[in-house]
Image: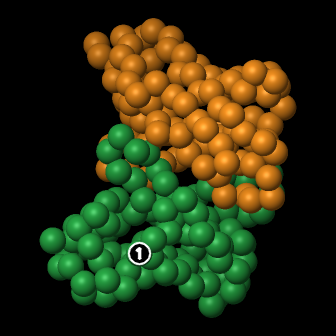
């Protein structure tokens, strides 16, 4: 089944404790992206990647890191999480075609205390 | 950059028709998407417009006017399960990763 898999679905952590949210897609998509979604602010792009070893900052990259060592994986790393990073996170992927829609993972709800 | 504007919330009656508008300002327009998102779930793709005009897909239709920076999503024969957020998203320039508006929360009541 074609899908984008994020883990974990839920995560509660404390300020400053490094964490990684994994994202993997099995559709051979070139493009992958991370979004955070907060009430009243909608989906905001954190980082995106147009292919292996190519990553770029989105609109809200501060406090986050990503890597794209393999085509299928695009982990999101929070080196020192803070409470303002409490949010719902989505990973998404797509082909490079103009009309190719994003396929989203099921989301990761992160709480930083 | 781009600026995308949608109403925050709309309500409608089961069986009725509702139009959700999206206006935008951008350079290098490359396509506009509509997604549906139920509470706590991932967004799912509804429609894509790159040329002016109406695209119809069952009960859902999407319209685009590039000269006016305007799109709408039309939902007919509303059902309770259509209660969700509807997200307008722009693809611009050389990036294939779209930028999203804040979404419109649609509440369908009996």
Image quadrant for the N terminus of chain A?
Answer: bottom right
Q: Which chain is orange?
A: B
Q: Is residue A9 left or right of residue A104?
A: left
In the rendering, at what x and y percent does residue A94 appear? 67, 62
In the rendering, at what x and y percent does residue B93 appear? 79, 52
In the rendered image, the vertical position of residue B109 relative to residue B91, given as above or below = above
In the rendered image, the vertical position of residue A22 relative to residue B103, given as above or below = below
In the rendered image, the vertical position of residue A83 relative to residue A65, given as above or below = above
Residue B78 visible to the viewer: yes
Q: Which chain is green?
A: A
| Residue bearing mark 1 | A63
In the rendering, at what x and y percent does residue B70 appear? 69, 24
Q: Quadrant of residue B21?
A: top right
Q: Residue at (64%, 72%) from the top-left corner?
A: A56
In the rendering, at what x and y percent does residue A93 appear? 61, 65
Q: Residue at (36%, 11%) from the top-left corner?
A: B13
| Subunit under mark 1 | A
Image quadrant for the C terminus of chain A?
Answer: bottom left
Q: Quadrant of residue B28?
A: top right
Q: Is residue B94 left or right of residue A20?
A: right
In the rendered image, the vertical position of residue B40 relative to residue B31, given as above or below = below
Q: Residue at (77%, 62%) from the top-left corner?
A: A96
């Amino acid at each position: 089944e074609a899908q984008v898999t994020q883990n974990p679905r839920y995560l509660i952590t404390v300020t400053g404790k490094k964490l990684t949210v994994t994202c993997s897609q099995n559709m051979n998509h070139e493009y992958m992206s991370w979004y955070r979604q907060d009430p009243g602010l909608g989906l905001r792009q954190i980082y995106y990647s147009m292919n292996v070893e190519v990553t770029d900052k989105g609109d809200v990259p501060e406090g986050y890191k990503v890597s794209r060592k393999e085509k299928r994986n695009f982990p999101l790393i929070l080196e020192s999480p803070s409470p303002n990073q409490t949010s719902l996170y989505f990973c998404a992927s797509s082909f490079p075609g103009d009309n190719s829609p994003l396929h989203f993972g099921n989301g990761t709800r992160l709480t930083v205390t | 950059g781009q600026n995308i504007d949608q109403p925050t919330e709309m309500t409608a009656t089961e069986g009725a028709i509702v139009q959700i508008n999206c206006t935008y300002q951008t350079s290098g327009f490359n396509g506009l998407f509509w997604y549906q998102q139920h509470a706590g779930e991932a967004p799912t793709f509804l429609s894509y417009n790159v040329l002016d005009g109406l695209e119809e897909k069952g009960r859902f239709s999407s319209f685009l006017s590039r000269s006016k920076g305007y799109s709408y999503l039309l939902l007919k024969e509303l059902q309770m399960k259509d209660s969700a957020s509807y997200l307008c998203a722009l693809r611009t320039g050389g990036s294939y990763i779209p930028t999203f508006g804040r979404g419109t929360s649609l509440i369908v009541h009996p």
